[in-house]
Image: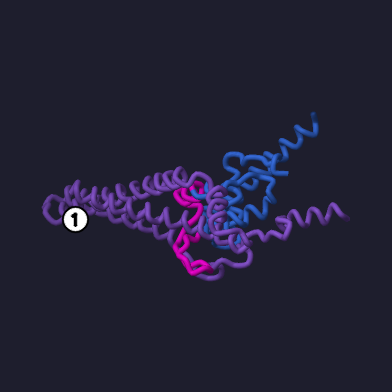
Amino acid sequence: MKNFLELISRSRKASIENEVHEELQFHIDTQASDYTSLGITPEESRVLAEARFGDVERIRSECIRISTRNTLLTWVLTFVFLMSLVVGLLVRALSTEVNVTRVGTVMTMIGGLGILLVYAKRAGSMVFTQSGSVRLGLDNSPVSFDEQGRTPFERVKSWQEGQ
Amino acid sequence: MRANRTDLMQGTLELLILKTLSREQMHGYGIAQRIHQAVDDLLKVEDGSLYPALYRMEERGWIASEWGVSENNRRAKFYKLTKTGRKQLADQSMNWERISRAVMRVLEAT
């Protein structure tokens, strides 16, 4: 059982690491691509994007630590509730004593409700509507620089100062 | 302008993220761009610092995430405000207004 849980935990951690890596890489790649579209060379774009992002390794480790912590708690809770459910059902099936059967019923209810709650919490955080802005829209487009390298805000400011 | 930029106060980044996501779901890069545009370079927000904040907020149930496809046809993780997150945004906004009013009063009085 211990080895089985360890295997699941390791596999889950690898999956989290991959997801974090993919998410951060998407950010840096998209930023670099936006810099390239402004006329900066791909090499410089990559350097600028990474500099703007900050310490990638530290951020990656922190994200993995937070995600793993969350997942571990879910696993532990699920395991405890599942055990309660199984033991409760066994007690109910095997016992002939009314009082012991009642204990089994309570354990079954706690286990079942607990699993439902854990599932509902996970499902609640996963529920999503795919409407609207799943794609990068104009609102999400990067700041466009003019030929003098000014952002729209800087252009508006200099225009206002000129008034 | 850049020399006068101010580092974000603790907790402020979360409020900015909540507000940004209150309009629509977005991926991390979109959130970063939106915040940069909104703060107009007055605040220093390092792009990478968004992610631990996003993960913590998801852990607390303020936001939820799902993988989708971005405009450049790549897999990206999209974040959306939950009901708890909306309540948190309202609470934090009120708290922020109260603090800034109090600080302004002190600054104006002295």
Within the magenta stretch, is there residue A69? no
| Residue in the picture at 67% in, 50% down | B39
Q: Is residue B9 above or below residue A138?
A: above
Residue B103 x/y as whole percent: 72, 35
Residue at the top extreme of this rendering: B110
Q: Colour in which chain B is shown?
A: blue
Q: Colour in which chain A is shown?
A: purple
| Residue in the picture at 47% in, 65% down | A128
- Residue B81 visible from this viewpoint: no
Q: Does residue A134 appear left or right of residue B5 in this picture? A: left
Residue at the right extreme of this rendering: A163
Q: Amino acid at mark 1?
A: Leu
Magenta region: B52-79
Within the magenta stretch, is there residue B62? yes
| Residue for badge 1 | A89
Q: In the rendered structure, the residue with mark 1 lies on which chain?
A: A
Name the quadrant of the C terminus of chain B.
Answer: top right
Helix, strand or loop at mark 1: helix
| Residue in the picture at 51% in, 55% down | A28
Other-residue count near label 1 (Cα within 10 Å), few / some / many at <14 / 14–19 / ≥20: some
| Residue in the picture at 53% in, 71% down | A131
Residue B80 x/y as whole percent: 52, 59
